Image: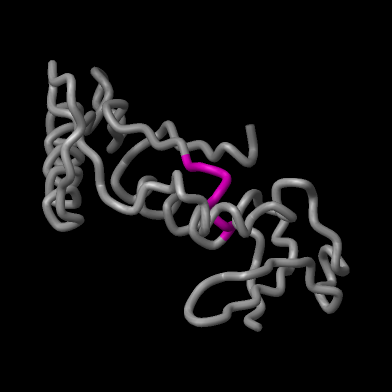
Amino acid sequence: MVQSICPYCAVGCGQKVYVKDERVVQIEGDPDSPISRGRLCPKGAASENLVNSPLRETKVKYRRPHGTDWEDLSLEEATEMIADRLIAARRDTWEEETDDGRPLKRTLGVAFLGGATLDSEENYLIKKFFTAAGAVSIENQARI
């Protein structure tokens, strides 16, 4: 058994994750958690299915522009594509200052919407990264 945090929202409910033969076999609320005291919402209670579902994608999928089929990409290739596009969008839409010379140092060409399966710490780091990159539009599904 390992202690964990539910991945679905920013509440941070404690979970006990039971692993047997390198496979998650059960997830339940952690009664020692001061946040949830052993209780989980329906999504948290079903989170074992998040890791064990036969429908879960385990490879990076990519559909090229105007393409009709998905193809598998390596994680490295997908990461490079994302980085190249982020850098280009930031460079092409960077606003250094207003027309009257007041500093802006921002981009409206990059936005980020985080998912609720990220925990608070991950969303905090993402917020810091995109803010440092000059993005203004940064949101998280758990807050919407």
- Identify the residue at horizontal 36%, vertical 53% (top origin): 129
Task: Identify which residue is drawn at 82% across, 65% down.
Answer: 35
Q: What span is in magenta?
A: 114-120
Quadrant where the image shows the C terminus:
top right
Residue 8 x %, y %: 63, 50
Q: Quadrant of the N terminus?
A: bottom right
Q: Position of residue 111 (x, y in %)?
A: 36, 32
Color scheme of the displayed model? one colour
Relative to 38, residue 59 above or below: above
Please tell me how many numbered marks the rendered image carries: 0
Percent position of residue 100, x then y: 26, 20
Magenta part mainly helix, strand or loop? loop
- Considering only vertical position in the picture, is 126 above or below 114? below
Q: Quadrant of the rendered structure where residue 112 is?
A: top left
Can you tell which quarter of the image residue 128 is in?
Answer: bottom left
In the rendered view, tell whether residue 61 sits above or below residue 52.
above
Residue 95, picture quadrant: top left
Q: Is residue 57 above or below residue 135?
A: below
> Is 115 within the magenta?
yes
Residue found 19% across the figure and 43% down from its top: 82
- 100 vs 43, left or right, is left
Q: Nearer the viewer, residue 107 or 19?
A: 19
Q: Is residue 14 left or right of residue 48?
A: right
Q: Going by the image, does 69 lie left or right of 24? A: left
Q: Which residue is pictured at 74% across the width and 62% down the height?
A: 13
Q: Magenta stretch containing residue 92, yes or no?
A: no
